[in-house]
Image (spheres, helix red, strand yellow):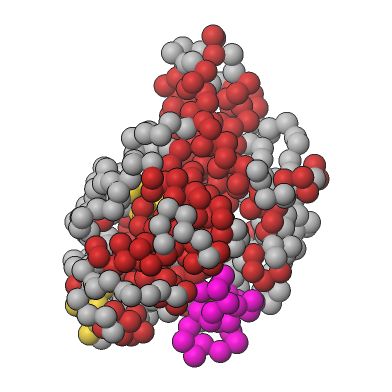
Amino acid sequence: MLFGLLMILSCESQLNVVPEDDVASSTVFTSAATISGLVTGIYSKNQSGDLNGNPQLMSDFMADNVAFVGSFPSLQEIDQFETLATNASIDNIWLDANELIAAANNVIVNLPQIDVNEVTDLNAADVTRFVGEAKFLRAVTNFQLVNLFAQPFQISGGTNLGIPIVTEFFTGDIAPFQLERSTVNEVHAFIEQDLLDAIAALPEDNGTRAEAGAARALLSRLYLYREDWARAADFANQVISSGNYALAGDFDFYDDNPGSSENIFVAINTATDGPQEAAGSDEVYVNFYNPSPGGRGDAPFSQDLIDTFAADPGDRRFDELSQAALDAQNNDTFFTTKYPDVVNNASDGMVLRIAEMYLNRAEANFRAGTSVGATPLADVNTIRARAGLAALGAVDLDAILLERRKEFCFEGHRRMDLLRNNLNLRPGGGAVSAPGADKVIFPIVDDEITNNPNITQNPGNF
């Protein structure tokens, strides 16, 4: 059952128009090969560093994991909570997300209208799977956008403005429909429905592409962010108990190993990938995190994160996934090695992995006072055991959030984990980085404001 929000999605809040490029788009739906190419193109757009790379980097340095020392003005603005609507980095996120959504909508809207009997090598099962993949990728992107450009559910129970819900195919990088923003609740309901549809449409094993387990995993995260503890625990438990994924015995899954049992969904980058329209996610990871050879060294561990690991020594997540080096300002510090392929710029971006499901289940069960699948203590100790740490005798919310921080540092989770728990993004950061503050979210970008007179800007952003 949905969380009761789909009924409040009015026809005005979504699109009901004929696609602008209907004739041109129909010409590519001529064979299974060309249709598969369209879907592969959505995955390629997901490789963009502005969808997988920069958002993770920004989320960690807006919070307390990264001591950003870079010289890019647009990133400095974000780091200092001074982001303007003209900021080029957030503009790229908005535009690339719109391009992916448009490409997904092309498949979602137009493919089901095709007569499979008239298309070479296409069958109904192919159509179902391709549409399911497009809906999953649209859900991932909309979730990224609403987390970055809107205050979280906790601020006003989700009644605050989220992002526009775009359901039709369009060309270009700004949707031409001039929509007002839907509420966070409405956006979440739309994402939820896409993911439920994807679960029904996708196989349990789809190689390195989206599969049903990935949709269940993202639903677990969505429900966790909405404080729907029962369903957050249930969907995490479904992923864990499926047997399709398992905690890796070591941390080699970061080393260009998308086939690892750890990974549920990964933004895969290879040495043969050309640069995306913006830098690919691989280039973002290498340039900012890796100081050598050839990296910028702009995003080292914060001292607070170093101290956090030092407080519980012997953690493999620090000992094996960090390197001592000079940062961009010649300070001795540490950098993550979660993005290790410096030579080929082919490190993968972690989107969903099984460790998150254990910690989602732990938090949701703790909050609800339940033990779906396992106790919160057992799940936390499972994660700690792989990290080489002693088992805890008891667990509380702080302990769970601490394990999330250490497990997912440099993967972009920290900002939302703090905001949704009413915690300041920076130790001693004051009002500017407090939950609900204007600049802990991004402004709606200037391009959208210019082209869409119906959209409302976030408070405090010009």
Q: Is residue 30 above or below residue 52?
A: above
Image mark count: 0
Queried whether the magenta region covers residue 439, the answer comes back as yes
What residue is at 49 percent from the left and 90 percent from the top?
A: 428
Q: Is residue 104 visible?
A: no
Q: Is residue 90 left or right of residue 444?
A: left
Quarter of the image with the N terminus in it: top right
Residue farthest top in this picture: 117
The quadrant holding residue 53 is bottom left
Q: Is residue 194 above or below residue 308?
A: above
Whole-percent x, y for residue 212 in the image: 46, 38
Residue 357 placed where, x, y %? Answer: 41, 55
The C terminus, quarter of image: bottom right
The part of the chain drawn in magenta is: 418-440
Q: Is residue 453 left or right of residue 151?
A: right
113 and 389: which is toward the camera: 389
Residue 417 in the image: above or below residue 166: below
Q: Residue at x 40, y 57 (%)?
A: 374
The answer to whether 447 appears left or right of 290 in the picture is right
Residue 200 seen in this snapshot: yes
Is the stretch drawn in magenta largely helix, strand or loop? Answer: loop
